[in-house]
Image: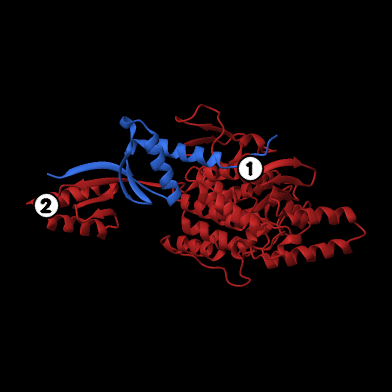
Chain colours: A blue, B red
Amino acid sequence: MYSMLVTLQFSSDIPMAQFIINLNASMPTSQKFIIHILDNTHMFVQPHVAEMIRSAVADFRDANSYEKPT
Amino acid sequence: MGEFRILADFLDVLLSSHPLPVVLVGSGALPREPMPSNVTVRLPSLEELEAYAVGQWECFLLQLISSSQAEKTTNFSSSMMKVFQRGLLTQRILILSCGIVLYMCSDYRDKESPRLTESGFQFLLMDTNAQLWYIVREYITNSQDRGVSQADLISFLLELSFHVAGEAYNINTLSDPQRNMIKDFADLGLVKLQQGRKDSWFIPTKLATNLSVSLTESSSRKEVYWLIAFLAHTCMEAPLKAHDFLDCVLKYVGFVVVETNFRMYAYSTSKLHCEILRLFSRIEYQLPNLIVGAITKESLYNAFENGITAEQIISFLQQNAHPRVAERIPSVPENVCDQMRLWESDLNRVEMTLAYFYDEFPSRDIFEAACEYARERGSLLWEDSKRMRLSIKAEIHMNMREFLRAQNN
């Protein structure tokens, strides 16, 4: 009678949300993970992509930092 | 942890142990007198006692960080080490009391060095008094398992804090359980045990007598420093002795200078200080009396991964600020503090919560009821009234199912 779905609610600031939407768009269709976008800071994603999102965010953060050339 | 919070916790333990036939010591009514000085021939001077207390305490703490780096191996009694089995070190560490050999059971390979848990790291950054109280509290809570009455332990500790630091008291004035307690306290640096030809005695150190008084206010520390410096200058006839004395006292005084370029200079010879600084900064040079380091993004991320928060690091730096910079407001430069907080929040930009998504409600009433149910428990994450969909935190999923099943009947 009810349909239930296990999902992961994702909340962050707006730039980060855009980054994730972009990431989703760049994935092949079978691997798209965003279930529903709630507003510009919240969305539902597949539960199994938590680690993948975290590592993508970490890579983005590392790319953003300045390393003094040795 | 503010000192009042710690005192309140201690009183909690005191009041919750029952029955409590504590006879609090009134003024001057100690059950024992200091021993006559003709018997206690090798009584340590106050500064030697301080050095002993600090040395024991640091050795004890260094055990937490790494057993291989402690300079002297002492035979900490197994009851003392069991204090750390819960909470501070990873669970299930078996400690053999001969020569401090630490083995891990089951999860880890044998003889691997123990890992600190998150609260262990936070513990290292607390100031000495807070740490001491923490240990004492854990020790008291564990006393039940060892068959020692909590009330006895607490009243003995309170009694101890009214003794005079530096005076010798005969061990045979203690009862048997108190004698066991004294051995554990010696491991912590609260008392020093000595043996004469016929008698043995214990000497309370400043750590013990300060149990009832708190020395953490930075203003009183500063005054102590300047007073000692003045005294040292006046002891010109024995300059070496003054230097040693200063050295001991400086261990209770701040030692870290943080500059606006994120460099850190710590005037300390203590291995423990070096290890603590290594937790969150990159140590660059170690000189005989100075540790030079830098606070970097990588070193901070390391600390954050271990569960230390930026606030804890900042308050540690502020509490241990070198007297030269301690007068400045703020004692740690604002740009360094702000940057640490920014780096910390950068790690937490994204939040993910496991949720259950419900759709296709048979009627609006049931949908509204479900929303209310979730909202009451603070678990409603999102709802869409138009299309009757909602999402709740995964924790109340089972309760929600029960609720909906009840609604249908």
Per the image, the residue denoted by label 2 is B406
Quadrant in the picture for the N terminus of chain B = bottom right
**Position of B347 relative to B331 (above/below):** above
Relative to B108, B166 lies left or right: right
Q: Relative to residue B156, is residue B287 drawn left or right?
A: right
Q: Nearer the viewer, residue A59 or B304?
A: A59
> What chain letter is assigned to the residue under label 1?
B
Three-letter code, disc 2: Ala
Which numbered dot is residue B200?
none
**10 Å neighbourhood of mark 2: few (<14), some, or many (≥20)?**
few
What residue type is disc 1 on? Leu
Q: Earlier in the sequence, mark 2 or mark 1?
A: 1
Secondary structure of residue under mark 1: helix
For label 1, the residue is B62
Q: Are marks 2 and 1 in contact (CB under 8 Å)?
A: no
Image location (x, y in percent) of residue B97: 57, 36
Secondary structure at badge 2 equals helix
Q: Quadrant of residue B369?
A: bottom left
Q: In the displayed orientation, state which residue is furthest to the left.
A: B409
Counting from the top left corner in percent of width and height, residue B159 is at 58, 63
Chain label for disc 2: B
